[in-house]
Amino acid sequence: MLTGCLFENRVGVKIFGDTSDLISLHKTVRKITMVIVDYELDNTNVSNLLVDFLEDIEKAIHRNKGMYYGFQSPWIDLLIVSGLLRLLSEHTVTDDMDKINMHLLEYIIEQTALSVNKQDYVAIINYIEKGVLCVGVKQFVKGFDAIINNKYSYEKH
């Protein structure tokens, strides 16, 4: 089962799991990320964020030699990824394991990030949950991409 903890600097979150946990999470994220490709939004910061998350999981899988291992990421990136996965999952076919992976990721983020910055946590979640209802996936991702550019200046780490 995936678990997570907040680093002492209160900026990064480490997600742990055995090889099968990480592979399962990777499959879920990859499946849902394909929605971005289907909407021809693969050259956006949102796409880059999801691809970087996939790469972090892949690195952890390759380093994992039968032990419990993981990867780290800024909590705000994980919060955005988690919210985007939930949003985009509504536009693809998911199975029970995908839903479990999303719930575990949401739980880890909630338990770690909410204690750090409740205001940003709530604002990001509210924006993601309400945004797509008004404008559709393609327009939402482009708008969200603009927010990432303006507020967080997302760059590959």
Image (tube, rainbow, N blue to C red):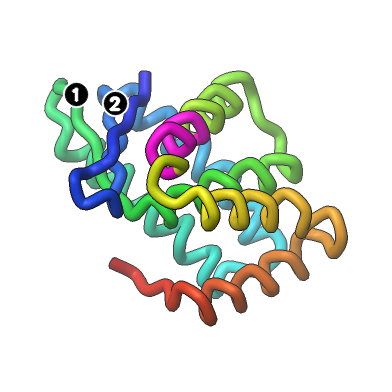
Q: Is residue 107 above or below residue 156?
A: above
Rendered residue at 66%/31% (across/down):
94
Placement of the C terminus among the 4 image quadrants: bottom left
Mark 2 to mark 1 CA distance (whole Å): 5 Å
**Which stretch did the figure color magenta?**
106-113
Crowd band around label 2 with a 10 angstrom C-alpha radius: few (<14), some (14–19), many (20+): many
Q: Is residue 111 above or below residue 125?
A: above
Placement of the N terminus among the 4 image quadrants: top left
Numbered badge on residue 17: 2
Q: Identify the main secondary structure in magenta.
A: helix
Rendered residue at 43%/77% (across/down):
153
Q: Amino acid at mark 1?
A: Tyr
Q: Is residue 25 left or right of residue 90?
A: left
Q: Residue furthest right?
A: 134
Numbered badge on residue 86: none
Q: Is residue 9 above or below residue 143?
A: above
Please check the rendered image and state whether residue 110 is part of the magenta-colored stretch, yes or no: yes
Residue 66 point in image, percent of width and height: 15, 21
Residue 77 point in image, percent of width and height: 43, 56
Dot 1: what SS? loop
Disc 2 or 1, which lies upstream in sequence? 2
Dot 2: what SS? strand
Residue 87 point in image, percent of width and height: 68, 46
Of residues 54 and 87, which is closer to you in this image? 87
Of residues 38 and 32, which is closer to you in this image? 32
Q: Is residue 113 left or right of residue 34?
A: left
Please check the rendered image and state whether residue 80 is part of the magenta-colored stretch, yes or no: no
Q: Amino acid at mark 2?
A: Gly
Numbered badge on residue 68: 1
Q: Is residue 131 left or right of residue 58?
A: right
